[in-house]
Amino acid sequence: MARLERHLNGNFNALLRYIHEGIIGGSVSATFEDGSDWQDGDTQVAVRVYERYSWLGQNRVSLSVTLVSNGPRLFLSAITSGGSQAVFFKINRFGEDAFLDKLAVLLDNHRG
């Protein structure tokens, strides 16, 4: 498992759309599995789960993205899972790290 967390500023819906398009458009095998949205006043929460095939690890990995806003202040937490071929412990995390790195690059390039 690998994790990425960032404090950001900007438009919640624009960033959520940018992340979604970047993940789906960034890999031939990436799929959107499911999502959930919640809002209470100025607070918004979105959870998105993506999956893709890791050619290097030869397995499927998932990426869960949670985006929270309170006005223009945003917090993102992303966690990967899967990506190991062992029964009792992880012997590689190539696919997980690569999936998370893709999101990190998207966030670094975002001009919100």
Image: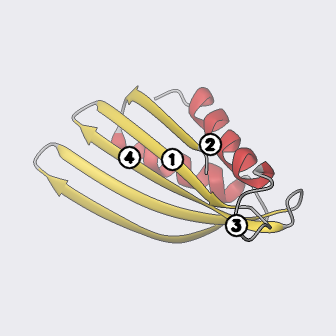
**Residue 104 vertical placement versus 27 (above, below):** above
x and y percentages locating residue 16 in the rendered image: 44, 49
The quadrant of the rendering that contains the C terminus is top left
Pointers 4 and 2 in contact (C-beta within 8 Å):
no
Of residues 104 and 3, the one nearer the viewer is 3
Q: Nearer the viewer, mark 3 or mark 4?
A: 3
The amino acid beneath tag 3 is Phe
Mark 4 or 2, nearer chain start: 4
Q: CA distance from mark 2 to mark 3?
A: 28 Å
Mark 3 or 1, nearer chain start: 1
Q: CA distance from mark 4 to mark 2?
A: 13 Å
Q: Nearer the viewer, mark 2 or mark 3?
A: 3
Q: Which residue is mark 1?
A: 78
Q: Nearer the viewer, mark 3 or mark 1?
A: 3
Of residues 25 and 63, the one nearer the viewer is 63
Residue in the picture at 69% in, 39% down: 101
The amino acid beneath tag 1 is Ala
Mark 2 or 3, nearer chain start: 3
Residue projecting furthest to the left: 41
Q: CA distance from mark 2 to mark 1?
A: 8 Å
Residue projecting furthest to the front: 88
The amino acid beneath tag 2 is Leu
Pointers 3 and 1 in contact (C-beta within 8 Å):
no
Residue 67: numbered disc:
4
Pointers 2 and 1 in contact (C-beta within 8 Å):
yes
Q: Label 4 crowding class (10 Å Cα cut-off): few <14, some 14-19, many 20+?
A: many
SS at badge 3: loop
Q: Which residue is mark 3?
A: 88
